[in-house]
Image (cartoon, rainbow, N blue to C red):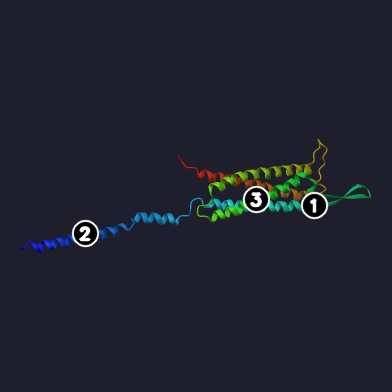
Amino acid sequence: MWLTPFKHCHKHTLKLAWLHVPAAMASVDTKAPPHETTEKSVQSSQPPHGSMGPVLDGGLRILLFATALVAIIIMAVSKQTKLITLMPGFSIPLEAKFTQSPAFIYFIAALSVACLYSIITGVLSLLALMKPGGSSTKLQFHFVVLDALLLGIVAAATGAAGGVSYIGFKGNSHTRWNKVCDQFGSYCVHIAASIILSLISSITLLLLVWLSVYALSKKIPRQ
């Protein structure tokens, strides 16, 4: 008979122990290990990988727009009229402007396309910058193809305009083409400045192609 209270007390103690065990386990499970919390906080504080790519891409496209636009304006206003003396007492006015050369017309058309292209792609690059994941692989692939195509167009226009300008500066004794920049100095200075800016636009497009290729190469899975 004296064992009965001890049995009831032992059963009561076991029940209390089983009630406290799940609570203790729940309290332990809800707390994350300290090293995991530290790693998560460090990862959240770090900037997203590759965030400088869209920033640099957008900056280069702004530079492309600025150089192409200024080159178009300088070429469009390159006009000079001068009196050329044919004989004593007889002079005629001669006008030099970019529309007199097909190479310069192509130059204006190519840079106009580059200017419009830089606006469209610049907006797309800025929108990609605001997205959490950055530029998509499909968008970067389109940038590579179109940037390379436009690089060829602008470089060809720059070369054609540069060839005509060189003849204007130096002439060609073999074909008896006389230089004209000794007579139209202001016109030739405008042409030279426009060609230099177009060369900067070509280099900018080359850098954009390299940047897009590098960004795509970073997305290729490593084996």
Numbered badge on residue 15: none
Going by the numbered disc 2, the residue's amino acid type is Trp
| SS label for mark 3 | helix
Foreground mark, 2 or 3, reads 2
Residue 104 appears left or right of 141: right
Mark 2 nearby-residue class (10 Å; few <14, some 14–19, many ≥20): few
Q: Which residue is mark 3?
A: 117
Residue 132 appears left or right of 67: left
Give the quarter of the image for residue 33.
Answer: bottom left
| SS label for mark 2 | helix
| Residue 197 appears in the picture as rendered | no
Closer to the camera in the image, 102 or 185: 102
| SS label for mark 1 | strand
As displayed, is residue 111 above or below residue 24? above
At 64% from the left and 43% from the top, the residue drawn is 149
- Tell me which numbered mark, 1 or 3, is placed earlier along the sequence: 1
As displayed, is residue 212 above or below residue 7? above
Residue 116 appears left or right of 39: right
Residue at the far right in the pictured view? 89
Spot occupied by residue 105 in the image (x, y as percentages of width and height): 75, 47
The quadrant in which the N terminus is found is: bottom left
Residue 63 appears left or right of 137: right
Q: Which residue is mark 2?
A: 18
Report the Cα–Cα distance between label 2 and label 3.
72 Å
- Tell me which numbered mark, 1 or 2, is placed earlier along the sequence: 2
Q: Which residue is mark 1?
A: 79
Give the quarter of the image for residue 161.
Answer: top right
Residue at the far left in the pictured view? 1
Closer to the camera in the image, 46 or 85: 46
Spot occupied by residue 101 in the image (x, y as percentages of width and height): 78, 45
